[in-house]
Image: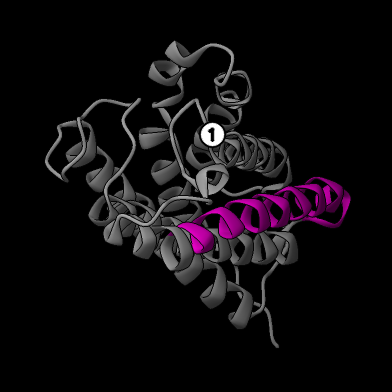
Amino acid sequence: MVAASPSTKRVGFWAAICAAALSIAYIVAQLFEWAGMLGSAGGPESASTPLGILLLLGPSLLLGPAFVVTMAALHCAAPPGRKVFTLAALGFAGMYATLTGLVYFVQLTFVAPRLAAGATQGIELLLFVPYESFLFAVDLYGYSLMSAATLMAAFGLPRLPASGLAKGALIANGLLLPFLLFQMALPPLIWLASAWAITFPASAIFLALMFRALPEAEE
């Protein structure tokens, strides 16, 4: 059985907790958005208002780094024979965080202020409109990479009783990949992809519990 250093356990645990909390914050905001309570027309196909952009994309921007750090800690804790899976997961996580981070940073710092001022002429390509915009397509590709990361990570977990639930949740999140990847062509797939609201927070919570249960080695 692999023993993890105290720093790996601490960093992995808190990164996974942060990932869970940030994903839940996004999910709550998304429910309010779809209900039309943040100023949009409601539903999954409506563009967000500046308030919606702030509440939805603020947690999402921070989720990327938290997920990358979680995958990095998992790679450090993985058994030697399974590190190829966690290294692949870390690579996919970095791609996800880079793509979605770029989208969200642009929306929060460049688009939202102009949207609030009604000055969107000339930046139409950068507007984040579900199923009708370039950046929305980039975002879906980013989350497809996140699903690929969780699927790979599931096969690199240490052998612990606490790993079983984490593996199941990670695989479930990974299996959402086609529903995310092909959503631009088939928007109704969002109703299947929305299972992410369960599978991803569950994955992060179970990973946190797994990090806590890891045997501890000396630094």
Question: Camera-side residue: 31 or 131?
Answer: 131
Front residue of 25/101: it is 101
The N terminus sits in image quarter: bottom right
Which residue is the extreme one toward the left? 37
Asked if one can make out residue 192 in the rendered structure from this viewpoint, the answer is yes
The stretch drawn in magenta includes residue 137: no
Residue at the image point whose x is 60% and y is 31% from the top: 174
- Identify the residue under disc 1: 133
Q: Relative to 8, is 91 on the left or the right?
A: right
Residue sitting at 55 percent across and 68 percent down? 12
Total labels: the figure holds: 1
Picture residue at 28% right of the left edge, 41% below the top: 30
Furthest residue in direction front, as rendered: 121
> Vertical placement of 6 versus 64: above or below?
below
Q: What residue type is labelled 1?
A: Ser
Residue 90, placed above or below residue 4: above
Q: Could you tell me which residue is drawn at 63 percent across and 34 percent down?
A: 144
Left or right relative to 137: residue 50: left
Image spot of residue 205 (x, y percent): 41, 52
Image coordinates for residue 148, horizontal then vertical, percent: 69, 36
Q: Can residue 63 be seen in this view?
A: no
* Image quadrant where one finds the C terminus: bottom right
